[in-house]
Amino acid sequence: MRIIREFWLPVLLYLVFLSGYQIWKECTLPVSEAGKNQVVLIPTGSTFSSVAQLLETKGLIKSKRAFYCLAWWEDATTRIKAGEYELSPAQTPIEILDYLVQGKIRQYIVTIPEGYNLFQIDDLLANAKLISNDSFLNVARDKNILRTLGIKADSAEGYIYPDTYQLTNDATAHEMLRTFVNHFREVWNSEEFSRRTEELGVQIHDIVTIASIVEKEAMRSRERPLIACVFWNRLKKDMPLQADPTVHYGILVETKVKKRRLRWKDLRKKTPYNTYVNRGLPKGPISNPGKESIRSTLHPSKKDYLFFVSRNNGTHCFSRTLAEHNRAVDQYQRRRKYRPIKKTNPVPTQTTDAKPEKHTQDDTKPGPQDLPAGESRK
């Protein structure tokens, strides 16, 4: 018996050591030095055993047994967070476990350009597979949700700050909207826009509305204050703003047709956003303006311009009088068919039969019957 014990004891110790060494390797070494990243979805309520089995099946760890031992040693078997992860077989089991415990969920980079409206943002998020179609649009128009966000309007249009965001696929449309609006508030407060708004004696909604039109009209940053001053001057004189983008937006809201060409009859179409048939500001913002458009609206140029027309090169010619404007139209828009703008009393305005005093989204079109419906022309 002594001989048997003396023989088997070293063998047993060797086997224990070998087993321990194998587990150690499986706990510390990656499956491979290089490998393609894989997306792993861990549902809410998953057990650690099922998570370990999933990782082993996908070839991200060598052994679910060794992974369990590692998690047990780290006291992490009950601390795994659900979510979508992007993991690699080149990661060590320790690194993978850290991802799961820390909740380093896969991030989707989404950029909302300046001047995008709610319809475009909804498409952007849906195309990124983060939401279903129209879900963001519906949330952004929910009055109960808007009330919780402090928005006193019919939609969140204008209050979504254009920027680059990191989102997760488990975030709801409501959570995304809150993120966007909170960022808008942060920028608004950091720039102290409220102080200037109070000095002007207007509401934040008015500023955001004008800025949203400036955002759609301006193609060069240096012209934003000039375009803003034209709209302010027109408001003071009770002249209609006559901004094409407001007509586009009104049609979009009513028909949900996102791409169609603007025609002369559209300028007479009665919508709450049409600034040809309605004087003053439209019902609300028509896009989500960036910081520079808001700043330009709050600090417009001190000029007495009332008109502007595109030079077809990204810049505009600004005019003080109707006569100046008609000469500019003749000079820069010869390829289009215009009828003379008749002066009316007491304030000179354009008739709905005349070309509006600003550029349209496409400056090379042959005639006013083919005005394009561009939601973003930057």
Image (cartoon, grey):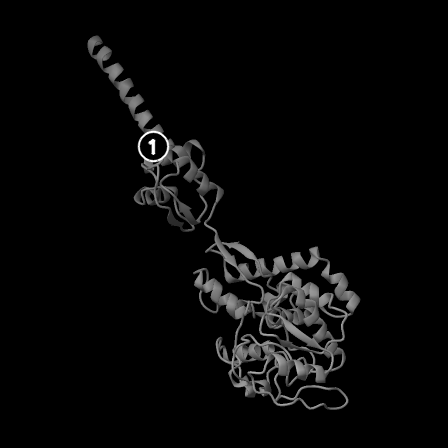
Q: Residue 325 lies in what quarter of the image?
A: bottom right
On screen, residue 98 versus residue 212, left or right, reads: left
Regarding residue 352, the answer to whether it shows in the image is yes
Determine which quarter of the picture holds residue 221.
Answer: bottom right
Image quadrant for the N terminus? top left
Q: Does residue 283 lie above or below 83 as drawn?
A: below
1 vs 287: above or below = above
Q: In this figure, which residue is indicated by the disc labeled 1?
A: 26
Q: Which quadrant of the figure contains the C terminus?
A: bottom right
Which residue is pictured at 72% across the width and 61% down the height?
193
Q: Is residue 138 visible?
A: no
Asked if residue 136 is positioned above or below residue 261 in the image, the reply reads: above
Secondary structure under badge 1? helix
Q: Residue furthest top?
A: 2
Q: Amino acid at mark 1?
A: Glu
Q: Residue at x 62, y 63 (%)?
A: 290
Q: Position of residue 141 (x, y in %)?
A: 56, 70
Residue 176 is left or right of residue 73, and the answer is right
- 18 to the left or right of 346: left
Q: Residue at x 44, y 37 (%)?
A: 76
Residue 228: image location, x then y, percent: 69, 71
